[in-house]
Every structure is written in C-alpha cells, then in structure tokens.
Image (spheres, rainbow, N blue to C red):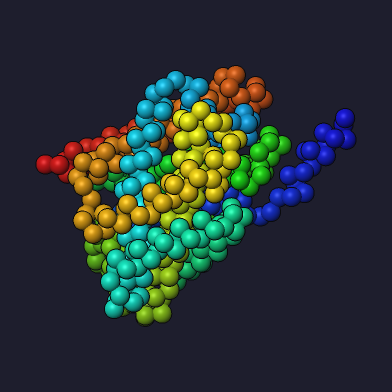
Amino acid sequence: MADASSGLAAEPRKKWKVIGPGIVVAATGVGASDMVSTLVAGSMFGYTLLWAIIVGVVLKIVLVEGAGRYVLASGKTIFEGWRTLGRWPVWYFAPYIIIWGFIYGATAMATTALPLAALFPGVPQNVFAVGTGLLGLVLVWFNRYAVFEKITAVLVGVMFVIIVGLAIIAAPSLPGLLAGLIPRLPEGSVLYTLAMSGGIGGTITLVAYGYWLREKGWSHPSWMRVMRIDNTMAYVMTGIFVIAMFIVGATVVAEAGVTLSTDSKGLLELTDVLNDKYGTFIGTAFLVGFFAAAFSSLIGVWNGVSLMFADFWCNMRGKSSDHPDSRENGKYFRFYMLWLTFPPMLLLLIGKPIALVIAYGVLGALFLPFLAITLLPLLNTDRVPKQWRNRWYTNVALVITAALFICLAIYKLADIIIGLF
C-alpha cells in the first residue's frame, strides 16, 4: 500500500513538463486593452504605480490558485461548485457567458487585426479581423489541448522577448524603478491603479484554468504542488511582461511627449513613436509582439471559455461534467466556438448595439468580485477536504481581492453610466 501511495505522489514529478496551463491562462488574460492601460499609466505617472502591478500579480496568483485548488481537491469543476451555492450563480453566469462571448468575439478579432493592418496597409482591417477569427477557430477545432498549449507557448515567447527587449532598450532608471515599489497614489491615478492591480491578467479566463488542468491530465490532489508552481511562475512572467510595458510607457512614450489614446489604437500610436526613436525594425518588431499578445488571447478564449460553456450547458441539460459533451471537441464546446466566431462578425460591420455593450460592461465588471466571493465558501467548507481548505491568510487575501474588485467594478459601472449621458 505504501509503495502504491508513493508511486501516485511521484507521478506528477515524473510527468511534469515546464509548460503547463498556467502559461495559457496568463497569456490569455493579457490582451491589447491591458497593454494600453499599462502604457498610458506609465506615460502619465512614471514609475510611481509600479507597486500596483506587483499587488495585481499577487492577487491573481491567489485567485487562480484558489480556483485550481478547488478543482483538484474536490474532483469537481468550478461550475459544479457554484451550483452548490444555490441558483444565483447560475442566474448570473448564464447570461454573462452568452453576452460576453458575442461582444468579446468581435473585440478580439478587431484587436488582433490592428497590427496586421498596420503591417500590410493595403488590406482592409476587417479582412484581417475575419481571417484571425477563422484561423483561431481552425487551430482550436482541429487540435487537442496539448497542441494548443504549445502554440500558446510559442506566442508567449515571441511577445515576451520582444516587449522585454524593448524595455531593456528603453534603458529605464533603476533608482526610479525601485522608488516605484513604494505605494503612492498621485493625483488622478486611482482608476489606473485599480486597473493595473485588479484588471490586468484576465477576468472570466481565470476560471478556465481549472478546465485546462483537467485537459492537461492534472486532475488529482497529488498535482497540487505542481499546480501551485505552474500558476506562480506563469503570473511572475505576466508581471515581468506588464512591467516591461509600463517601462516603455514611462520612458519612450513620456519622453516623446505624446498622448496615447486609451483604446487599442493607442498601441499603433506607440509604433509611430518607436519608428521615430529607434527605426522601423523596432517598430515592426513591436507590431509582431502586439499580434502575438492579441492572438494568444483570442485562441485562449476560443479554447478555455468554450470548455467553460460546454460544462455549463452539460450541467443545465442534466449531464455530468464527465460527459463527453462537456469536454474538448464535444458538441457544446464546438457550438460556443462557432458562437465566438461567426455572429460577432456582424458587429464588425454594424458596430456594437448599445444595450449589449452596457450589459457586457455591467456583467463583466461584476465577474471578478463574483469569483473572489464564491471562492470563500467553496474553500472554507466541507466542499473540499479539510487539508485543502483556506488558511487564515488566504482568506484575508481573498477578502482584500474581493474588496479591490468591487471598487474596480464601481468605477467601471460609473464609467458606463457616465458614457450613457
């Protein structure tokens, strides 16, 4: 019996590879909007908000570790866990995943098309938008998780090397960077601080981590230590990437004396600055890194959120989360991929209906508080074995995370309301 037990414990160490689901969830969570908000914050406030990025990395590590720990310890998916809390999580999640997918699909395709349209100005942007959506669909539809993970790792490597290399070329001030680790809130920085500490690194895609663990084959508590290492290292890499973007904003953009727009086109404006300062090679390389970051987010959603939808719909149909229809390449998985790809193409032509945009903004702002709050009962009760329940310091971190995300949600909702008038 002892030999069998030790063999089970040794299995993860024997099979574990360097790349795991953590790198996928981290890459998926950092999209064009995160890159722009970081650039703008760096250009406006210098290095003074660097500490907020560190806080954000720690909070996301806590949040994703909690979601992964629940899945490994309970043997259930996160949606199965939410259903044990009553009907209200379903009432929230059901409209959210439908509306979110419709709006996000259009946004992801349009964003991924931006750098391609800049590299090849003779081709209309919508052609690239449709093309990237179809390419993402094909890559995820015809490949299993293992191949998808490798594709994501390559894209992460490209965007990481280019953006970190650009930060090194920018020659940041070391004393300035170190001073940025001291928590400060310059005038007018509250919203940017909340965005960097709470918003960077994903929203609904954080929950996909548990589903990627299952597809990876990490489905037993004996994988707990591996999962924690995987998650931590992935978000440390995300933190380095975001800090690199922050440095570029605080040096290149600030020194150029330009003001970037706060939408995704702000990244294209940075390309012009880089071309003027370092030459077209660096500007072109940045566009390649921009594309890698945007496309990794696109295919991550096409795979991960489709897995979430498949599990959700299977449960709603009275099937278990172990049913083939709830897994990768099942019929519900493929239906949601089609939902992400084709209906949103209409939005590329007609624009986004205001009612859906408002619903998308409201439900999206509430998702991270929803996740943080629901993890508290899931990880403090007999829903998981006692040895895997939260320690007091984990509960404190989750409460702080929930409070921060609620503040961020209030700011986002206020922004939506102001936008209406």
**Total numbered labels:** 0
Residue at screen point 37% across, 46% down: 101
Position of the N terminus, as image quadrant, is top right
Q: Is residue 312 left or right of residue 112?
A: right
Residue shown at 41% from the left, 51% from the top? 338
Instruction: State the residue at coordinates (37%, 80%).
Output: 280
State whether residue 82 appears in this view: yes
* 415 over 37 or under it: above or below: above
Q: Nearer the viewer, residue 135 or 157?
A: 135
Q: Is residue 253 visible?
A: no
In this view, 299 is above or below 319 = below
Instruction: Locate residue 299, reporting x and y percent.
Output: 47, 56
Percent from the top left, x then y, of residue 382? 60, 19
Residue 73 at x, y percent in the picture: 64, 30
Question: The C terminus is located in which quarter?
Answer: top left
Q: Nearer the viewer, residue 280 or 5?
A: 5
Question: In the displayed structure, would residue 56 be above or below residue 302?
Answer: above
Horizontally, is 267 left or right of 420 in the view?
right
Residue 335 is left or right of residue 394, and the answer is left
Q: Give coordinates of residue 229: x percent, y percent.
A: 63, 45
State the residue lying farthest toward the left: 421
